[in-house]
Image (cartoon, coloured by chain):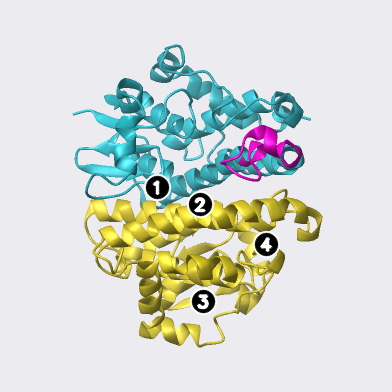
Chain colours: A yellow, B cyan
């Protein structure tokens, strides 16, 4: 039985964190909106089906379960695909780390939309410049410095001493930040050697490498979470 | 054995969502920073202890477990204190709802800090006015409209057809928004009768009522997440 992933077409966005997990696990899944269009997703958001009501994509259908929110989905998939350690303490820690990544992703989004999601970037560019400056100078170093410490405490290779879904999300964070803020990330790179090593190991995992080389990996673009606007990179 | 809750003193903040859960459950807990000062919390954030490293408060110690991120903590406490239904589908849904509340809380914070957490409100007041306008006009109706539908789909009384930790968080959301945006909330109230009913039932629960009447319930103030700045209420 295939999972059904529901997420907007045309961008990586938050759906990509789920996609990387499914791809790394080699789990069969249908990327519903890509196959049937965004409308196939809207009936779920409009409440036309019984059961759990998602607030926003991505959400995953697994049999009769409907699971929304990235970290919730990864927490569900992790144990089913050997992508999280078995102990309660490590599962709680993995989820905490994923929720901290979720917070970071929201802050990335707000660098280009600091006033309103419903307004164009051009209509909030002045505010975006101010917010992005703080994000580059304070928030990226704080978050990535934290995750660097987390990998160090995990022995230097993995936050949880073994491969987990958290690694996949950290890979995506680095890839996205490198795309959106290349200058800021180049400057910061010497301070995050363990994260850089982790991202390389993730990219070299056979299923991940195959995915990244496929057409299923939509390139980063300016409709996603990670957007490259040179004026926001200082 | 008592839980140990770690959160900043002097404000409700994100810690309040955990506090409401512990109080409703009648679970014994030590509010560590209030008893020993914020320094007692810093050694955990500084990484002086082995195991899970929190990124930020609140975090909860339960025996040797260290659990950070509000939704993660509530998901841990729920089954232990009969504050979430037993089925997997309902637990996943409860957690999804809590994570959506987490997103809303972050947006509330950004109404008064749309540029940088590290800057004073006064230094981002112009941006705050713009962001708060969008928040009042678009985001509050979208989030609360969603949760109103969720309660309706749950039968009209509870999102999950029975009392759960999600109710406590929704109570806190309404209390906080009423404090921060009284005019906007008064205008919206006719559209959220089920949420208003739910909040009343939560406030009348004996343990919650006793807590709200106690000195442990710090009043809302302008160092917390929910701040009343009249110029942001339109």
| Residue wearing tag 1 | B55
Nearest to the eye among marks 3 and 1: give it. Answer: 1
Callout in the foreground (2, 1): 1
Q: Is residue B19 above or below residue A46?
A: above
Q: State how far apart marks 3 and 1 are (Cα).
A: 35 Å
The mark that comes first in sequence, 4 or 2, is: 2
Q: How far is disc 3 from disc 2 in space, using C-alphas?
A: 27 Å
Marks 3 & 4 on one chain: yes
Residue B111 is covered by the magenta coloring: yes
* In contact (CB < 8 Å): disc 2 and disc 1: yes
Residue A125, visible in the rendered structure: yes
Q: Secondary structure at mark 4?
A: helix
- Provide the residue span drawn in magenta: B110-127
Dot 4, how many residues are within 10 Å of its Cα: few (below 14), some (14-19), or many (20+)?
many
- Residue A211 position within the rendered picture, expressed as x and y whole percent measured from the top left: 47, 83
The verdict on residue B59 being magenta is no
First along the sequence among labels 3 and 4: 3
Q: Chain of mark 1?
A: B
Instruction: Name the residue that disc number 2 marks.
Output: A103
| Nearer the camera: disc 3 or disc 4 | 4
In this view, the residue in front, A20 or B57, is B57
Residue drawn at (34%, 64%) of the image: A78
3D distance between C-alphas at marks 3 and 4 = 36 Å
Report which residue position mark 4 lands on: A232
Chain designation of label 2? A
């Amino acid at each position: 039985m295939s999972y059904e992933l529901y997420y907007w077409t045309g961008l990586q966005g938050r759906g990509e964190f789920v996609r990387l997990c499914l791809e790394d696990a080699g789990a069969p899944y249908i990327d519903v909106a890509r196959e049937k269009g965004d409308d196939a997703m809207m009936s779920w958001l409009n409440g036309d089906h019984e059961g759990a009501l998602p607030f926003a994509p991505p959400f995953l259908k697994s049999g009769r379960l409907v699971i929304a929110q990235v970290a919730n989905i990864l927490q569900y998939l992790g144990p089913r695909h050997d992508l999280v350690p078995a102990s309660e303490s490590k599962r709680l820690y993995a989820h905490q780390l994923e929720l901290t990544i979720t917070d970071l992703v929201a802050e990335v989004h707000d660098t280009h939309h600091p006033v309103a999601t419903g307004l164009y970037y051009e209509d909030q560019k002045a505010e975006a410049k101010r917010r992005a400056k703080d994000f580059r100078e304070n928030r990226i170093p704080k978050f990535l410095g934290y995750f660097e410490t987390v990998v160090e405490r995990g022995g230097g290779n993995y936050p949880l001493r073994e491969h987990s879904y958290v690694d996949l999300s950290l890979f995506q964070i680095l890839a996205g930040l490198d795309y959106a803020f290349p200058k800021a990330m180049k400057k910061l790179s010497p301070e995050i050697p363990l994260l850089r090593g982790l991202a390389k190991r993730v990219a070299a995992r056979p299923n991940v490498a195959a995915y990244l080389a496929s057409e299923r990996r939509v390139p980063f673009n300016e409709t996603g979470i990670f957007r490259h606007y040179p004026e926001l990179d200082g």
